[in-house]
Image (spheres, grey):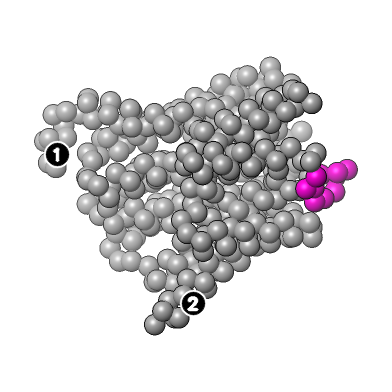
Amino acid sequence: MTSLEANSSSRWTWLRGMALAVPIVMGYIPIGFAYGVLAQQAGLSTRNTVLMSLLVYAGSAQLIAVGLFAIGVPAFSIILTTFVVNLRHLLMSAALSPYMRHWRKGELAAFAYELTDESFAVHIARFTEHTPPKGEVFAINATAQLSWIFGSWVGAVAGQLIGDVKPLALDYTLPAMFIALLVMQIKDRRHSVVAAATGLLAVALTLGGLGHWSVIVATLTGATLGMALEMRKLEIAD
Amino acid sequence: MLDQNTILLTMLGMLVVTYIPRVLPLWLFTSKPLPSLVIAWLRYVPVAVLAALLLPALVITENNAVQTLDVSFDNLFLWAAIPTFIVAWKTRSLFGPVIVGMVIVAAIRFIV
């Protein structure tokens, strides 16, 4: 794929990218809307609500953060929780890196900014099949983020009109989103075991009073369990 | 009431801790791979963190500011999770399960 080929059809490249982003957009607008409403309810200004979608661009972390803002959790804890919740992007980034060896550092920096669960799923599926033009890749990312920001903004504006989120079940957006993301991550029985064990541990720690630290402790423990199970299986296999 | 400037500063912190894991592997690992132990550990971080976030949200409710375990039929979130899981399993998408879950919760709240 020469840069000449990519440039000659660059408008189509962008349009193709936008079309490929439609499945992501369909999820991002309603969830972004829910985030916008909940952020308003938590006390964030409209500007900060939209700004978070622009700066952080991480749906589940944003939804968790506004929940933590609402109950007065200190900034440091919110940032630490965000770090743990988004740590999985490290793995996704690592998974993409072999396919992006030929990209320049600046392009990688721009690409990384818009890496999310959903965009990762689209990119990894495509990169294993062929090498799309970079314009198409960026178009997917940009369309996805714009739809997220748009949904957030609409939610922030509507949030001032929505008194109670419960009739619209907007408070169920986050659990439902986690269910969807969790199921997408279950690849084999070991993943199910790790999920169950980690979930139960998180519940126990929360009941035990650890609060939002339970997520961090449970995650670190669960990932270690998964690693140990995998290493053990390899040893037995030898 | 929350101070918007504090929120902004917190968001900048969130930006930093979110962006660094996203960009470092792309910048570093394109030349040499990670030790297999680290890769194995990282492989389970996504499923672990999602489970750690999900299960407490489903089975723990706050009664008078105390976190209590609630697996009764009153726990709408928990029971709505069952069809949500099924849809998630079948569609492996974000849109389907989220819409189904929210519609079910809204519907039950409307009816009951």
Q: Is residue A61 above or below residue B20?
A: above
**Residue behind mark 1:** A3
Residue at 46%, 75% in the rendered image: A233
Q: Nearer the viewer, residue B64 or B3?
A: B64
Dot 1, crowdedness within 10 Å: few (<14), some or many (≥20)?
few
- In what element is the residue under mark 2? helix
- Confirm whether the magenta stretch covers residue A192: no
Residue at 76%, 33% in the rendered image: B1
Amino acid, disc 1: Ser
- Confirm whether the magenta stretch covers residue B66: yes
Q: CA distance from mark 1 to mark 2?
A: 47 Å
Dot 2, crowdedness within 10 Å: few (<14), some or many (≥20)?
few
The span picked out in magenta is: B62-72
Residue at 70%, 50% in the rendered image: B56
| Protein chain holding label 1 | A
Say if residue A74 shows up in the picture: no
